[in-house]
Image (tube, rainbow, N blue to C red):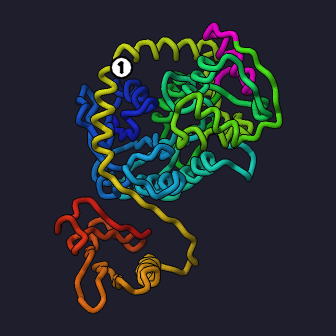
Amino acid sequence: MSRILLTGASGYIGGHLKDQLKTDHDIIAISRNINNKENEKNVTWKAADLFDLKEITEVMEGIDTAIYLVHSMMPNAKLTQANFEDMDALLADNFARAAKKQGVKHIIFMSGLIPNNNDLSAHLRSRLECEKILGSYGIPVSTLRAGLIIGAKGSSYPILKRLVERLPGMILPSWAYNMIAPVSINDVINKLALLVERAPQQNETFDVTGPEIMNYKELIQRTAAVLNKRLPIVDLPIIPIWISRYWVQRISQVPKEMVYPLMNSLVHDMIPQPKRMHPDISFGETSYEESVQQALNEENKMNQKQSKSKKATSKNNKEQIKDVRAISRFKVPESYSIDDVSKIYANFINNMTLHLVNGNINEHEFNIKLPFTNQSILKMECDTQTSSKDIFVYKIVGGKLAMSNNGGNARLEFR
């Protein structure tokens, strides 16, 4: 029985995949908070923060196949100073580094359909970058790319359903005639399960689609038909995408951090590419109407457990509210080492504060002091267990601004 590490196990796709795989595999299910999780036959829950390279490396020990079902469009900290592209890149890099160190044989990644277009939206650009990062450490990566996944939860379909339910009619812009390849959540799970059984020797990418490709207007009309909703539609091609984003967010009440990146992808045809089609993996069998009806039935069952779900969500939010996260990326010459980058950062602090504070950094510590007094306001020491030639990790150990001499997991990283 192979050992599978499943990230996103508490999410919608991850939860379904866990239930599908646990009969024949030993599942290590990963979540930041496992207080409300219970182990079951062939499923062991472990707490790990994917932003922490040390934690994800530890839980990756003994794993044969690692499944990556992660995106960062929704901030998960009290204060986030980073865009989701930077967070996605960091998480994918941590995951791939950990897998490489622990000798993982196979990585599986759930991505999005990528159009043949150089001008990709930030969301699709980030998905493609994650594919490249995961595949850059020498471990074979199997990527499954899907467009609109039809299921009770997830990212895109609930937005569509809310719009159809709540609006008395729709005014559709030009993007409504772009093409989309919807696919049932059940078909996606079945295809991911097939990827688990593969043993590729190199990176591979497959597109997956349902039986029908349609434009967004038809998608809306057919959704309304399943919901028994009369929905008059008027075309108004001149509406720009930024207005569409705004009213979709207002009507659906889904956070803009989720809606805006997804909406920006509507300017592309989201359809599978023939060169990425596989006879066993790329073709879902569930019709669109059947997919929507299955999603409605699942949603009704989930609503019966709503009170438990709210309690668990509240508990998770209390854990998240403590976090502060900042990530910055910039280009440097290829000849620069991580040591060079860290020294540039220390000089940046000195110059930005007009030397009201002095930052001194070396391979052992990063000390920020007040001039003349020689008093540390923040002292960090290099974490030798996590650091390497291409990543420096400094952990807080003291200073006037430190809440204690043990900074817990607070850290500064260069990579």
* Magenta region: 210-230
The percent coordinates of residue 130 (x first, y second) are 54, 51
Which residue is at a point 38% across and 67% down the rendered structure image?
A: 413
Number of callouts? 1
State the residue in front, 319 or 336. Answer: 319
In the rendered structure, does residue 271 fall within the stretch colored magenta?
A: no
Please name the residue shown 56% across and 12% down the image.
293
| Residue at numbered disc 1 | 306
Quarter holding the C terminus is: bottom left
Is residue 206 or residue 315 the one in the foreground? 315
The extreme bottom residue here reads: 372
Residue 163 in sight here: yes
Residue at (39%, 57%) from the top-left corner? 325
Q: Quadrant of the N terminus?
A: top left
Secondary structure at numbered mark 1: helix
Toward the top, the furthest residue is 228
Would residue 339 be seen by someone viewing this image from the given angle?
no
Residue 184: x, y in percent? 57, 22
Q: Is residue 407 above or below residue 106?
A: below
The image shows residue 373, relative to residue 376, as above or below, that is: below
Residue type, numbered disc 1: Gln
Q: Residues within 10 Å of mark 1 (few under 14, many from 20)?
A: few
| Residue found at x 32% / y 37% | 29
Quarter of the figure with residue 188: top right
Q: Position of residue 208 (x, y in %)?
A: 62, 31
Q: Nearer the viewer, residue 58 or 310?
A: 310
User: Residue 214, percent across and down?
Assistant: 74, 24
Q: Residue most toward the left?
A: 405
Is 215 left, or right, of 141 in this rendering?
A: right
Is 127 displayed left or right of 24 in the figure?
right
Residue 302 shown left or right of residue 243 in the figure: left
